[in-house]
């Protein structure tokens, strides 16, 4: 794990030359998933009786010690709150945490919430209700930054021996059809087929009957996902998802969009991989799999 002090020092150096977009005494609303809210309060040190707001002095720098191993969402919020405060668009950020994913994105698109506190894949906007769609920021994680492992049944020695994309193409994948980015990625690999199902609980039966051969998922799925119980991770290979992670912003807040884009640009100016390193620091990108072979090298840098 990289040193938090190094990451924070880089951010401080970047912010020292950051221009202010505007002076304001306002509140920016940020929508976050309900399941993220308790962890964010703990990571950012909010007392249990504190209001649902973040002040300037409570906004952690990306790369802070408090964010080591605390996951993608908390690091994304640290990027967002620093972008807003450095641009002087707000003195406080109001946390809106009551809405599930689709309703949150619809509220951002409708201008009821200023910005999502976490990133999405752009394909997620297909779920939004209404004709107006949110503005999308520059990529936080670029195409190719987010990698997944390949999983199969433990008796599939033929799949477990795969060590190249050419060999993987002999097999069929299985994926939940609503997981658009995973489906898009698998469809682009030139496989023997991609079986699309309604729920991940169908994986075992489909793999056991040989109607499909493998799936892709987070490296830790064997520990964290019910469907992965009893499965095996194909060693030494990984797949990069074919979509970036971006912040959705209200169409009524182009100033918020500009602030986010400017901040991300400054973070990446000296080192295009710097933001990706922040997600290693957060434990979202697993450094122990860095040397595994990427079968679809789509990374931009």
Image (spheres, rainbow, N blue to C red):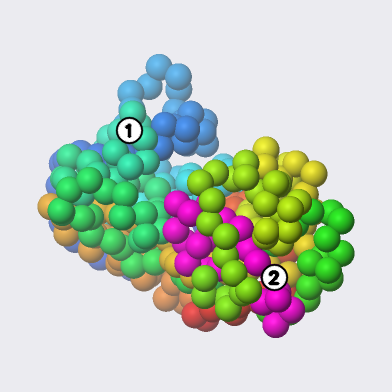
> In this picture, is 89 found above or below 235?
above
Picture residue at 50% right of the left edge, 62% below the top: 183
Q: Alpha-carbon distance for marks 1 and 2?
A: 39 Å
Picture residue at 51% right of the left edge, 46% below the top: 198
Q: Position of residue 77 (x, y in %)?
A: 41, 47
Q: Can residue 72 be seen by looking at this rendering?
A: yes
- The foreground one among 66 and 187 is 187
Q: Is mark 2 on a helix, strand or loop?
A: loop
Residue hosting label 1: 99
Residue hosting label 2: 171
Is residue 209 left or right of 103 when viewed as pictured? right
Picture residue at 63% right of the left edge, 54% below the top: 218
Q: Where is residue 124 in the image (x, y as percent from the top left)?
A: 36, 54
Q: Position of residue 172 (x, y in %)?
A: 65, 67
Q: Which of marks 1 and 2 is nearer the N terminus?
A: 1
Q: Residues within 10 Å of mark 2 (few under 14, many from 20)?
A: many
The circle drawn on residue 18 is none
The residue sitting at the top extreme is: 49
> In this picture, is 284 found above or below 235?
above
- The foreground one among 154 and 142 is 154
Q: Is mark 1 on a helix, strand or loop?
A: loop
The answer to the question of whether label 1 and label 2 lie on touching residues, with beta carbons closer than 8 A, is: no
The span shown in magenta is 166-186
Q: Can residue 88 be seen by looking at this rendering?
A: no
Picture residue at 55% right of the left edge, 68% below the top: 186
- The foreground one among 227 and 140 is 227
Q: Does residue 169 show up magenta in the picture?
A: yes
- Rendered image quadrant of residue 63: bottom right
Is residue 53 left or right of 213 when viewed as pictured? left
Q: How crowded is mark 1: few (under 14 residues within 10 Å), some or many (20 or more)?
A: some
């Amino acid at each position: 794990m990289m040193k938090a002090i190094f990451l924070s020092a880089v951010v401080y150096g970047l912010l020292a030359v950051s221009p202010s977009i505007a002076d304001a005494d306002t509140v920016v609303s940020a929508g976050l998933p309900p399941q993220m809210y308790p962890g964010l309060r703990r990571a950012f040190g909010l007392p249990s009786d504190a209001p649902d707001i973040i002040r300037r002095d409570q906004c952690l720098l990306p790369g802070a010690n408090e964010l080591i191993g605390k996951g993608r969402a908390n690091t994304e919020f640290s990027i967002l709150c620093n972008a807003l405060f450095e641009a002087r668009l707000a003195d406080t950020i109001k946390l809106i945490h009551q809405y599930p994913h689709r309703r949150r994105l619809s509220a951002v698109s409708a201008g009821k919430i200023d910005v999502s506190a976490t990133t999405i894949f752009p394909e997620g906007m297909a779920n939004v209700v209404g004709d107006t769609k949110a503005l999308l920021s520059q990529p936080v994680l670029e195409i190719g930054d987010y990698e997944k492992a390949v999983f199969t049944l433990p008796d599939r020695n033929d799949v477990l021996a795969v060590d190249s994309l050419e060999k993987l193409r002999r097999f069929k994948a299985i994926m939940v059809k609503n997981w658009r980015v995973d489906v898009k990625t698998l469809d682009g690999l030139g496989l023997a087929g991609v079986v699309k199902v309604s729920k991940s609980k169908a994986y075992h039966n489909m793999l056991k009957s040989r109607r499909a051969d493998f799936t892709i998922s987070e490296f830790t799925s064997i520990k964290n996902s019910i469907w992965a119980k009893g499965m095996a991770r194909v060693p030494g290979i990984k797949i990069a998802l074919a979509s970036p992670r971006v912040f959705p912003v209200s169409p009524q807040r182009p100033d918020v969009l500009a602030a986010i884009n400017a901040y991300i640009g400054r973070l990446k100016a000296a080192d295009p991989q710097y933001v990706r390193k922040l997600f290693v620091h957060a434990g979202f990108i697993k450094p122990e799999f860095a040397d595994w072979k990427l079968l679809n090298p789509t990374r931009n840098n």
